[in-house]
Image (tube, helix red, strand yellow):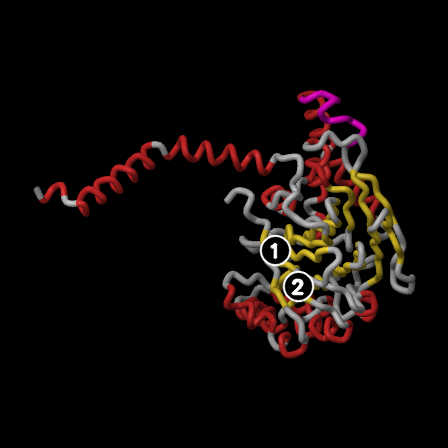
Amino acid sequence: MRLFRPRNIVLALVVAGGLGLWLNRGEIATRAMGRIYERALGKAPFADMPDSLSVALCGSGSPMPDPTRAGPCTAVLAGNRLFVVDIGDGATRNMSLMNLPPAKVEAIFLTHFHSDHIGGLGELMLQRWAGGSSKAPAPVYGGPGVDKVVAGFMAAYDQDRGYRIAHHGPTIVPPAGFGGAARPFDARKGQPDLVVFQDKDLKVTAFPVEHAPVEPAVGYRFDYKGRSLVISGDTAVSPRLEAASKGVDLLVHEGLSPNLVAMQNAAAVKGGNKTIAAITHDILSYHAAPEEAAAIAQRAGVKQLLFTHVIPPLPLRALEGPFLGKSRSIFSGPIQVGRDGDTISLPVGSSDIRHSNRMNTFR
């Protein structure tokens, strides 16, 4: 009978299998979720990485609304030690999605105190404490005024602190571990580069950058077992940043496209929005264009350039070319326009530069 031809039998099996999967989709999804939880909540979240100095963008955005980018945040891994440079809105949740547990954060470094760079500080300090039973507050490094920033967030979260201690008990959330401990340093203009953290194989150096009228405003250089990287923070063209970047493996630099921002400005002027027109005019003075960052990287002998704090938002990848402008003809090394989750690793004992995206914990 034609009914039992091999082709019909195969088709029936495929249909039956698909129906079985559909009917059991809830159970299958639940089992998959269990494996995801095991990975996300494991004790060795960095076990998949070799000994290296790495950056992972937990936020590559700016104050401008961008559905694909959290506020500025760069996680730095030195071996299995986790540090964070700036912490914008949404970045703490991104860290968890990237399997970078806030509980593992050893210290936080702030480049300056613009709201988009500190907006997530309270949440990170809370998650580090409540998610890791921390017995000591998170060290928060920054220029003069960092003590006020830390104290303000701790005051805002003080009632939540009480709720969690009452609910979970002091063993799970030790009262002494709540919040942050400010570690101020003076790296303002006119001051020399300053080693603000040095322990075992890791050294972190702060240096002033150009972000007037914002002061203090600093960048950071990380050195670990022969590998090195610089994080610019917000800055216009900065000779101090260029000097600090000499020969580094990776420069993580902010970027603002004057041409694309000019389009925003023109639209605001045309629409009679004087406030946005003024802001999109003013921000040009204290940010660097991608071509300017590329020139810095070329002169400094940087191996690779990664853009973050992307202005304006780039909803389409096709806009990365207009954003970069002539950068690729200026800098001879690889250039990447960063997106949340992008990770660049510098393995110890080699000159390799490896790329991945950690935004896959729940995929």
Q: Who is closer to the viewer here, 212 or 112?
A: 112
Residue wearing tag 1: 342
Residue at 65% in and 54% down:
57
Mark 2 residue type: Leu
Relative image position of residue 183 (x, y in whole percent)? 86, 45
Specify whether residue 146 is in view: yes
Relative image position of residue 353 (x, y in whole percent)? 67, 61
Give left or right: position of 39 versus 215: left
Outermost residue toward the left?
Answer: 1
Q: Decide whether residue 182 is among the magenta residues.
A: no
Give left or right: position of 276 versus 197: left
Outermost residue toward the right?
Answer: 191
Mark 1 residue type: Asp
| Magenta-highlighted residues | 168-177
Residue wearing tag 2: 306
Q: Is residue 186 above or below residue 37?
A: below
Relative image position of residue 223 (x, y in whole percent)? 81, 57
Q: Quadrant of residue 14?
A: top left
